[in-house]
Every structure is written in C-alpha cells, then in structure tokens.
Image (tube, helix red, strand yellow):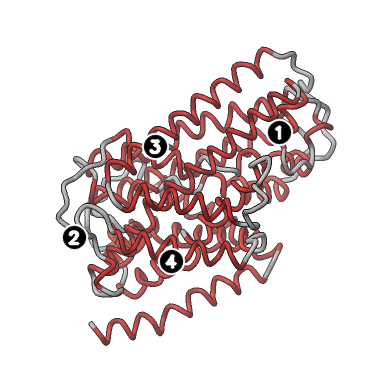
C-alpha cells in the first residue's frame, strides 16, 4: 500500500463512477432493443432491470470496499479473499482487455463522432491524441487529473439536462405504439446483455479506494450514488428516444440518439447530441486512465509486476504510461469492433466472481456489511451468469477469447512468483 495523502472525496469518486458508466452505450443500444422487443415500454423495462442489477452490483462492491478499502479493484479482492493466482488473472484481464481494450474502443468511438478529422492526421490520430491529453492530465499531478475529470463530467451532465429540457418541450410523436411482436423473455434477456454493458463501470471507485478520504464510508456511497444518477439519466434519455419520435424512425438504428434528436429538433439538436456523446466518451477515456493503472500499481506492490510500476509520489506514473502505450498500440492495429462483446463477456465474469467472494467470506465466518446481503450479491451474480450463458449461446467463440486471455496469464503468474 502506497503512502501518498488521501486526495479523492465523494465528488471525485462519484464523478469517476458516472464517467466510467455514462459512455456511448446509452446513445446506441435502444434502437436495436426496440427492433427486438417490439414496444417502447419493453425497452424501458429492460433499462430499469439493467439499472437495478447494476445497483445490486454497486451495493455488493460497497461491502467489499468496507472490508478492504485499498486500491486495486478485482485484483485486490480476489487476491486477498480467494487466492493470489485468481487475483493475478483478474489483473491480467484488466491489463489485456478490461482497461486497454475499453479505453481504445472509447477513443476510436470518440474519433468517429468528431465531424471532420484534419487531413494531416491519419485514421486513429484523434483517438491517440485524446489518450495522450488525458495521460498528461493524470500522470503528473493528482489534483489536476481529478479536477479535470470532475469538470468534464459535470459539463456532460449539464448538457444532457439541457437536451432533456428541449426535447421534452417538443410534441410527443411516439406515444404508446402497438406491439410489433409478441413479448419474449428470451428477447428481453438478449437485449439486457447489451444494456448491461452500458451499466458496467459502476465499480470504478474501488480502483482508487486507497487514495480516498474516509474510504470505508465514501467509496460505498459513491458507488450507489453514481449508479443511481446514471440510472436516472439513462431512463430519462431512453424515454425521449422511445416516446418522442415515431417508433419506426428509431427502431433498428445504430445512432439512435442522433436520429431521435433530429426527428425532435432538427439538425441543430442532432449536432448537440453528437457533441454530448463525444464529451461522454472523453470522460470514459479519462476515468479508465485514472482507474486502470491503480490496479497495476497494486500488482507491482505485491511483487507480481515489475517494481517501477508502483506509485511515484502521488501517482502511479509508470503504470499510467504503460496503460497509455498499450492503448495506443491497440488503436494503431485494430478497429476493435470484434472486441466489444468479448470485453463485456470477460469483464462481467470477473465482476461476478468478485461479488461472489462475499459468500466466501461469510462462509469463513466473517461479518459482511453490504446493503441487502445476501440478496443483492445473489441477484447480481445470478443475472450476470444468465447473460453469460445467453452470450455463449449466441456466439460460442466469445468464451474462447476469455479462456485464451486467462490461460495466457498463468505462465506469467508463475514466472513472477518464482522471481518474487
């Protein structure tokens, strides 16, 4: 555990959670969900269920943070509560996929929402530039990174509120459309697989818990507060997307937010929404560049990564540079489209295993202080495993990527243990 002064308060931790969660997913998912489910009501039900599952996860992670208020996330909890090898593999997944792949995806998506890339910049250039800017903000001064993160999250929420205000003043064209298909539990569960990806990131505050003020109190509070705020915005936004335009306009649309905005308010509102999405993706890049390197710093402190990845003063500078370098490599050599489902599948299983460690602790006779225990962790783990089974049924190759990622970490773990 590093010895820098605790710097993150409730505002920073809550903004970290919101920044991690509120990315591109909410602006792209519901058009496909409407095509699959047949009515706006069913889509709204999916977003409500997804939010309640995420809230169960946030409350469960809050119990883990009360038990061990240090930085490191899944790596820390699984190492201490299950076995060091299991924790290392979770950290390995974060290094290869969880943060590296997710940051690269957000950066490439950010570039796609910028109207015109300068001709002298190659494809991927704006994405790499965004990564470099946020790397500089987080790598040298802890308060600069935190303040910039808080500021852009608050600006994003204000812009979303402005969009909701103008959209709600427009006449409602959609209303309660007649069902275009029979209700299907299978279709709802399939849509929840994608909706759950938009809710991932509710656990972001645990990655920096060792730098939080009064972490045992503020980290759990930030988890559920950030999740509730994000859930409220998700429900409000989807109400606009589903009920204000005619369902035929948005059903099956990938860019559902911009399509709905143009239908409601014309080109200017669609352009405003695209600016919000670009800003939302910036907060995702920033939040993950802030959180991910803390995992590697903790692994280095435990002797499972080279020692120079530990904290240098108030920040894990070398770990941040490692994260940025890996992201830039992925941006340079991949478009990441094929990685999206793999990322969601792999990370959701890590999160479910982490939450399940609460039951391991209870079985050992330890007291669990987690709101709603044992129901909240049971709901989260059960729902996540259900989504995983559905994802494998739809695309059996997704599990192959997860298995390869995990197995590739085993020889590295044993090598580092031997050196240690």
Label 3 neighbour load within 10 Å: few <14, some 14-19, many 20+: many
Indicate whether 10 appears above or below 383: above
The N terminus, quarter of image? bottom left
- Earlier-in-chain disc, 4 versus 3: 3
Which residue is disc 3 drawn over? 15
Q: Secondary structure at mark 2?
A: loop
Percent of width and height locating residue 146: 33, 41
Which residue is disc 2 drawn over? 1
Residue drawn at 27 percent across, 63 percent down: 298
Between residue 116 and residue 415, name the one nearer to us: 116
Which residue is disc 1 drawn over? 258
Residue, far front: 120
Which residue is disc 4 drawn over? 95
Between residue 420 and residue 407, name the one nearer to us: 420
Q: Secondary structure at mark 3?
A: helix
On screen, residue 314 versus residue 296, left or right, reads left
* Labels 2 and 1 touching (C-beta < 8 A): no
Q: Mark 2 and mark 1: span between their CA atoms?
A: 45 Å
Q: Mark 4 and mark 2: span between their CA atoms?
A: 20 Å
């Amino acid at each position: 555990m590093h010895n820098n002064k605790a710097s993150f308060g409730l505002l920073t931790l809550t903004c970290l959670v919101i920044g991690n969660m509120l990315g591109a997913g909410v602006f792209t998912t519901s058009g496909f969900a409407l095509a699959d489910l047949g009515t706006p009501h069913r889509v709204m039900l999916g977003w409500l269920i997804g939010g309640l599952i995420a809230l169960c996860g946030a409350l469960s992670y809050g119990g883990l943070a009360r038990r061990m208020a240090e930085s490191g996330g899944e790596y820390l909890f699984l190492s201490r509560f299950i076995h060091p090898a299991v924790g290392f593999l979770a950290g390995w997944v974060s290094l290869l996929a969880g943060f590296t792949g997710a940051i690269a995806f957000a950066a490439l998506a950010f570039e796609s929402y910028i109207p015109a890339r300068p001709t002298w910049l190659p494809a991927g250039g704006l994405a790499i530039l965004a990564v470099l800017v946020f790397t500089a903000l987080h790598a040298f001064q802890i308060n600069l990174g935190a303040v910039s993160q808080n500021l852009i999250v608050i600006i994003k929420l204000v812009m979303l509120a402005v969009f909701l205000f103008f959209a709600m003043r427009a006449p409602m064209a959609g209303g309660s459309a007649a069902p275009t298909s029979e209700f299907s539990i299978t279709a709802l569960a399939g849509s929840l697989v994608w909706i759950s990806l938009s809710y991932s990131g509710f656990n972001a505050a645990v990655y920096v818990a060792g730098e939080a003020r009064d972490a045992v109190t503020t980290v759990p509070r930030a988890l559920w507060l950030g999740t509730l705020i994000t859930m409220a915005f998700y429900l409000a936004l989807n109400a606009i997307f589903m009920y204000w335009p005619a369902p035929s306009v948005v059903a099956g649309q990938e860019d559902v937010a911009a399509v709905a905005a143009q239908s409601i308010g014309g080109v200017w509102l669609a352009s405003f929404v695209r600016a919000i999405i670009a800003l939302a993706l910036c907060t995702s890049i920033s939040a993950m560049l802030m959180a991910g390197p803390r995992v590697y710093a903790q692994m280095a402190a435990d002797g499972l990564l080279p020692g120079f990845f530990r904290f240098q003063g108030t920040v894990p500078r070398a770990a941040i540079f490692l994260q940025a370098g890996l992201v830039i490599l992925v941006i340079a050599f991949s478009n990441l489209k094929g990685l999206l489902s793999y990322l969601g599948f792999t990370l959701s299983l890590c999160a479910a295993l982490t939450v399940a460690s609460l039951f391991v602790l209870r079985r050992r006779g330890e007291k669990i202080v987690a709101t709603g225990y044992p129901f909240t962790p049971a709901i989260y783990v059960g729902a996540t495993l259900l989504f995983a089974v559905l994802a494998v049924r739809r695309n059996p190759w997704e599990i192959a990527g997860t298995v390869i990622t995990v197995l590739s970490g085993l020889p590295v773990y044993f090598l580092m243990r031997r050196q240690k």
